Image: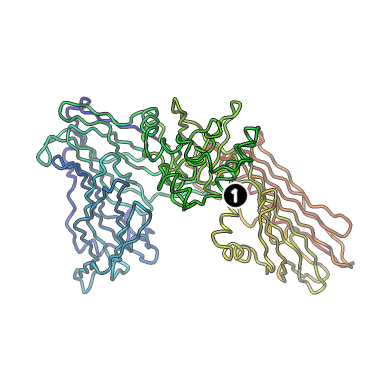
């Protein structure tokens, strides 16, 4: 992934102007030709296409408000595949101090071609409804009416915001191709912004410099992109947004009344800022707040690691996550102690507080979750992060905890946490650390089956997960037990019954069930043809990408997956031939696979295992995965013959 840090300060530029002839902030006139356009010139199969997109941020030099203006024109070629464009959603933010954004002047239209004329439908205010996404965000939603194949959607709106520090991130590569997209930021010269670029696209037009705008000396940052293809996802990527071209701006410094004020610009600046923050550092430093909450037997434990684990178990089992991310507390530890429910900051800062109250060296680690994207290490800013976990240092070893999941253990944290890097905030320094998941996730699928005289196959199936797989399975089960059980019937072509799922005393998550199937055997006269893995065989190569791999290969954790199938041979039959066993391993032993089939008395035992030694790999490993998964597919699709004696 290419990363460029673009920094512009007041003293750094007097003027720099490029592509003078290009005119920004000028939406082309809508014409009937937009409606007559039958397909995208960028991608003729695209269900929709952005004809024009403008994101304009400007700081009002007189009232200090951030004006956010958006203008979109989108062509719909196939409305059934353009769901994301059929509604307009506008988030409005506020903060704990009561400052909030205001939505102004929403104009939205749908254009259609009727009898060679433009038919305009205005989006009525009655289609608007609000949704409270979380404590600090309300989303205004509008439904576009009368959308057909060939329609053009156009909308413009303005949001006035008091939040000048971090300008919203904008992706210049979307899932929809774009004929034209521009990003503009205008600010008074006494306000200096860092501009952070990530991604591979370069703007077709750009203009950076000082101008007289909106009645004041200003700095402008303008970038325009033409004929941008739709972003193409790849399998085994934690978050594709990490690789999209995007722009983010953050306030670096201000100069008012002959006074220079610098905002966070180093990781240490962030630590110092958060150390005395009422919703962060002051929460986990008040050890008297939680001293009496811990059971006495935990305080009496002498072994530091056992004590840390016991405190963690107490917090995760006593308090419940409300599924709101954030590293600041939402309501504070006092309120958490009463309500027993809180956000990530509430739970994990409570955990750190309790650990510190027992004289353990405990510190917060700020992270950006997988869904939030990578932390740009070249661009220190607090806006990188949206989550906090706890670290305990014992005998120079660091142990990690996250109390948001009931199934979590030391070092076994939810998938969302494992996003490469974090910022460890010790009491005296900030330190960027790697967050690599080194604990293997295990998945074992065991089947004991019997071939019946009528040609049906019956038996028992067990699916057991350990480590991160167990955590994920338990969370999915808790969220919707019926849906979790239904997946077995949807994923396999057999009939399951008596499905039972539970957590074992040792932490594994196990599901057991009975099964019956009449379509696992092909009868060819005296022969019965059957796959010795029954319904568990790999049906295709998961690594089937034809184009050259672009991005990292992510698994979130090392993996070990085993399939064990035991089939009882029916009386009067013998095995005519067995599939060939296979074993393959890369030179560095990072990826391995083994497949064995053997006959023991009147039973056939098949064991198939693959192991992936690391949580992620450079893209150069893709051919190795492709080769081994072909071996897996070829091996597991072998069949055996049972012949009547």
**At 66% from the left edge and 34% from the top edge, which residue is drawn?**
587
Spot occupied by residue 246 in the image (x, y as percentages of width and height): 34, 42
**At 40% from the left edge and 47% from the top edge, which residue is drawn?**
330
SS of the residue under disc 1: loop
Residue 259 in the image: above or below residue 450: above
Toward which corner of the image does residue 642 lie, by quadrant?
bottom right
On the question of residue 494 being in view, the answer is yes
Residue 404 in the image: above or below residue 428: below
Residue 257 in the image: above or below residue 239: above
Seen from the viewer's position, the closer of residues 630 and 608 is: 608
**At 22% from the left edge and 27% from the top edge, which residue is drawn?**
260
Count neighbours of disc 1 (C-alpha within 10 A) and say few if under 14, some if 14 to 19, many if 20 or more.
many
Spot occupied by residue 270 in the image (x, y as percentages of width and height): 37, 32
403 lies left or right of 180: right
On the question of residue 242 being in view, the answer is no
Residue 9 in the image: above or below residue 127: above
153 lies left or right of 246: left
Seen from the viewer's position, the closer of residues 142 and 302 is: 302
297 lies left or right of 110: right
The residue that label 1 is drawn on is 407
In the picture, the quarter occupied by the C terminus is bottom right
Asked which colour scheme the image uses, the reply is rainbow
In the picture, the quarter occupied by the N terminus is top left
Spot occupied by residue 187 in the image (x, y as percentages of width and height): 19, 38
Spot occupied by residue 399 in the image (x, y as percentages of width and height): 58, 35
Seen from the viewer's position, the closer of residues 276 and 541 is: 276
Number of marks in picture = 1
């Amino acid at each position: 992934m290419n990363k460029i840090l673009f920094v512009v300060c007041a003293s750094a530029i007097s003027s720099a102007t490029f592509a003078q002839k290009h005119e920004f902030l000028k939406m082309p006139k809508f014409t009937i030709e937009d409606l007559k356009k039958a397909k995208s010139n960028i991608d003729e199969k695209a269900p929709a296409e952005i004809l024009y997109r403008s994101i304009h941020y400007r700081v009002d030099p007189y009232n200090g408000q951030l004006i956010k203006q958006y203008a979109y024109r989108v062509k719909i070629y196939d409305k059934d595949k353009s769901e994301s464009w059929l509604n307009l959603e506008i988030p409005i933010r506020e903060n704990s101090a009561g400052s909030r954004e205001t939505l102004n002047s929403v104009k939205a239209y749908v254009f259609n071609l009727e009898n060679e004329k433009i038919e305009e439908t205005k989006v009525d205010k009655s289609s608007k409804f609000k949704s409270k996404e979380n404590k600090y965000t309300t989303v205004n939603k509008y439904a576009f009416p009368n959308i057909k194949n060939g329609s053009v959607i156009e909308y413009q709106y303005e949001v006035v915001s008091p939040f000048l520090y971090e300008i919203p991130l904008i992706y210049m590569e979307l899932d929809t191709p774009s004929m034209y997209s521009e990003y503009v930021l205008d600010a008074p010269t006494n306000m200096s912004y860092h501009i952070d670029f990530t991604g591979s696209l370069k703007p077709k037009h750009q203009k950076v410099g000082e101008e007289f705008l909106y009645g004041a000396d200003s700095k402008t940052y303008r970038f325009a992109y033409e004929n941008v293809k739709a972003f193409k996802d790849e399998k085994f990527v934690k978050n594709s947004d990490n690789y999209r071209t995007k722009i983010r701006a953050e306030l670096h410094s201000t100069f008012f009344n002959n006074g220079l004020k610098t905002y966070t610009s180093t990781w240490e600046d962030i630590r110092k800022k958060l150390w005395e923050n009422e919703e962060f550092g002051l929460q986990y430093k008040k050890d008297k707040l939680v001293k009496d909450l811990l059971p006495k037997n935990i305080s009496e434990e002498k072994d530091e690691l056992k004590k840390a684990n016991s405190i963690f178990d107490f917090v995760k089992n006593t308090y419940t996550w409300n599924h709101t991310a954030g590293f600041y507390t939402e309501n504070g530890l006092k309120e958490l102690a009463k309500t027993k429910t809180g956000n990530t900051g509430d739970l994990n800062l409570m955990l750190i507080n309790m650990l510190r109250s027992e004289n353990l060296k405990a510190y917060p680690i700020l992270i950006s979750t997988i869904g939030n994207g990578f932390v740009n290490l070249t661009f220190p800013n607090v806006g990188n992060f949206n989550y906090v976990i706890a670290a305990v240092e014992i005998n120079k070893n660091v142990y990690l905890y996250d109390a948001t999941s009931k199934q979590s253990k030391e070092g076994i944290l939810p998938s969302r946490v494992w996003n490469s890097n974090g910022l460890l905030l010790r009491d005296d320094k900030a330190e960027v650390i790697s967050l690599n998941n080194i604990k293997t996730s295990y998945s074992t699928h065991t089947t004991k089956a019997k071939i019946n005289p009528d040609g049906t196959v019956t038996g028992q199936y067990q699916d057991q997960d350990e480590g991160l797989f167990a955590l994920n399975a338990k969370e999915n089960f808790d969220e919707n037990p019926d849906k979790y059980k239904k997946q077995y019937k949807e994923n396999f072509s057999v009939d399951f019954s008596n499905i039972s799922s539970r957590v074992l005393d040792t932490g594994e998550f196990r599901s057991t069930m009975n099964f019956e199937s009449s379509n696992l055997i092909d009868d060819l006269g005296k022969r019965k043809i059957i796959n010795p893995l029954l319904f568990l065989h790999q049906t295709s190569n998961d690594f089937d990408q034809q184009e050259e791999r672009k991005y990292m290969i992510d698994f979130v954790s090392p993996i070990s997956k085993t399939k064990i199938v035991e089939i009882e041979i029916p009386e009067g039959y013998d095995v005519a031939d067995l599939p060939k066993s296979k074993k393959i391993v890369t030179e560095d032993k990072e990826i391995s696979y083994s497949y064995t089939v053997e006959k023991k008395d009147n039973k056939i035992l098949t064991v198939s295992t693959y192991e992936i030694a690391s949580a992620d790999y450079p893209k150069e490993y893709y051919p190795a995965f492709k080769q081994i998964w072909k071996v897996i597919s070829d091996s597991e699709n072998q069949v055996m013959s049972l012949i009547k004696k």
